[in-house]
Image (cartoon, grey):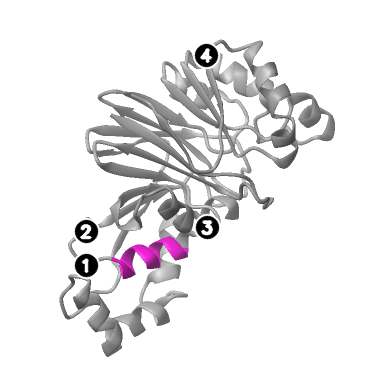
Amino acid sequence: MATLHLVGTGTPTPTPQRFGTCHVLQTDGTLLMFDCGPAATHKLVQAGLRPTDVDFLFFTHHHSDHSADYPCFLLCRWDQSTGRENMLQVFGPPPTAKLTENLIGPDGAFAHDWKARVGWPSSQHVHVNRGGSLPRPGPVVEARDVAPGPVTEAAGCRVTAATALHAQPWLESLAYRVDAPGGSVTFTGDTEPCDTLAALAGGTDTLVTNCWDLQETMDANGESPGQTGTLEAAAMAAEAGASRLVLTHTGPALCEARDRAVQQIAEQYDGEIIFGEEGMSIELW
């Protein structure tokens, strides 16, 4: 059984309904998190998921709407741990490893926080009362920069990455595919349609894609490069042969034109179309 949790379905523009991007694939008790946008940690808990249960985090790229909550997630997961949890494994394009070290390394931006919690007697008591033991260890995370190709295997799932075309050369961007015993999911991240993504997504069961705005609007205002519009999302899902298309990273204008967006896509794609909402959980298989 697998469930897709849409923790964050927004963009850099905050609205009352959505802000930033974060998705969690829950399969056989394992949580694989993709991106960690604004307030992701809080929204994760609102979805009934605990940060300490997330063992794998994958970054598509490091725009702030995909990674701004990373320091909060790292510190919360460590602070709430008892020391018996699995080590967090983090994967992403550069500068994933450097960013992690700069945040929680011995000389990182938040070293003052975790060093105080390690040394302060009251924090030590909280840690012990939670089930931990002394001396309290500092945060240890395995963070790796990854490139297109095989990434890792987790709980019977095979994770593969491919290049996504978004904001190169300023930022490297990746899309990810998860192949599990019950099915497959492809997370495009932010991208325009491209051959590398088409190859990655071919035959996937569920395609989770950014969809910024109506296609005609994006083509007219110059916002098409590096992003996906409605008709492009439909074409990508149809080409992949996906049975389900999940729209996320949807801009404010598209949210207001939701019915028109779904109608446009349905004219080119005959699979299930889900206009993603924050807090939505989708049973995949």
Decide: is 37 above or below 280.
below
Decide: is 225 above or below 241.
below
* Secondary structure mostly taken by the magenta-highlighted segment of the chain: helix
Q: Quadrant of residue 112?
A: bottom left
Q: Earlier in the sequence, mark 1 or mark 4?
A: 1
**Label 2 sits on what residue type?**
Glu
User: Whole-Å distance between the Cαs marked 3 and 4?
Assistant: 32 Å
User: Whole-Å distance between the Cαs marked 3 and 2?
Assistant: 23 Å
Q: Quadrant of residue 33?
A: top left
**Dot label at residue 39:** 3
**Label 4 sits on what residue type?**
Gly
Residue at mark 2: 85
Task: Look at the image and say whether residue 76 sits in the magenta stretch.
Answer: yes
Q: Is residue 272 visible?
A: yes
User: Whole-Å distance between the Cαs marked 2 and 4?
Assistant: 39 Å
User: Whole-Å distance between the Cαs marked 1 and 4?
Assistant: 44 Å
Label 1 with label 2: CB-CB less than 8 Å: yes
Toward the left, the furthest residue is: 133
Residue at mark 4: 271
Quadrant where the N terminus is found in the figure: top left
Category of crowding for the residue at label 1, using alpha-carbon neighbours closer than 10 angstroms: few (below 14), some (14–19), many (at least 20):
some
Residue found 68% across the figure and 17% down from its top = 263
**Label 3 sits on what residue type?**
Ala
Task: Look at the image and say whether residue 215 sits in the magenta stretch.
Answer: no
Residue at mark 1: 82
User: Whole-Å distance between the Cαs marked 3 and 1?
Assistant: 23 Å
Instruction: Using residue 198 as the reference point, say whether residue 265 is left or right of it.
Output: right
User: Residue 53, how many percent across, how many down?
Assistant: 29, 52
Quadrant where the C terminus is found in the figure: top left
